[in-house]
Image (spheres, rainbow, N blue to C red):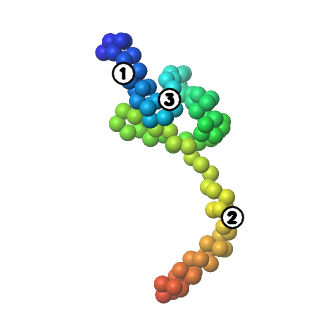
Amino acid sequence: MSRGGDVSIIESLISLINQKNLMERIIRIGKRNAIYIPKEIANSLNLKEGDRLVIVVKDDKIELIPVRKPSKYWAEISPEEVEEVGEEISRSLGVNS
């Protein structure tokens, strides 16, 4: 495909993305296949240096999904509380522990 064809495809994609109110940027792959997330996108997703991302490859697309820490509610449950609730469920189901 010619360079002009590539440009028209990119312009069409950008137009489609803008219609759907999505954020897009064209970036380059750097040394050692590194990609850099533009600052405004990282800020909008509250991504910081050292955060982890899951990379999903499907067909010819790459998706990056931030790995978020568990919410404070999960962190506030002690192992004893989990065990107690498990025992209550077992009793209610008539399961001997």
Of 37 and 29, which appears nearest the observer?
A: 37
Return the disc, 2 or 3, that comes first in the chain's sequence: 3
Residue at the disc numbered 2: 76
Which of the two discs, 2 and 3, sits closer to the camera?
3
Q: Quadrant of residue 35?
A: top right
Residue 67 vs 61, above or below: the answer is below
Mark 1 is on which residue type? Ile
Element at badge 1?
helix
Vertical placement of residue 92 versus 22, above or below: below
> At 58% from the left edge and 28% from the top edge, which residue is drawn?
38
* Secondary structure state at the residue bearing disc 2: loop
What amino acid is at disc 2?
Glu
Which of the marked residues, 3 or 1, is nearer the chain's N terminus? Answer: 1
Give the CA separation, mark 2 to mark 1.
50 Å
Residue 9 disc label:
1
Left or right for 4, reference 17: left
Q: Residue at the far left: name it.
A: 1
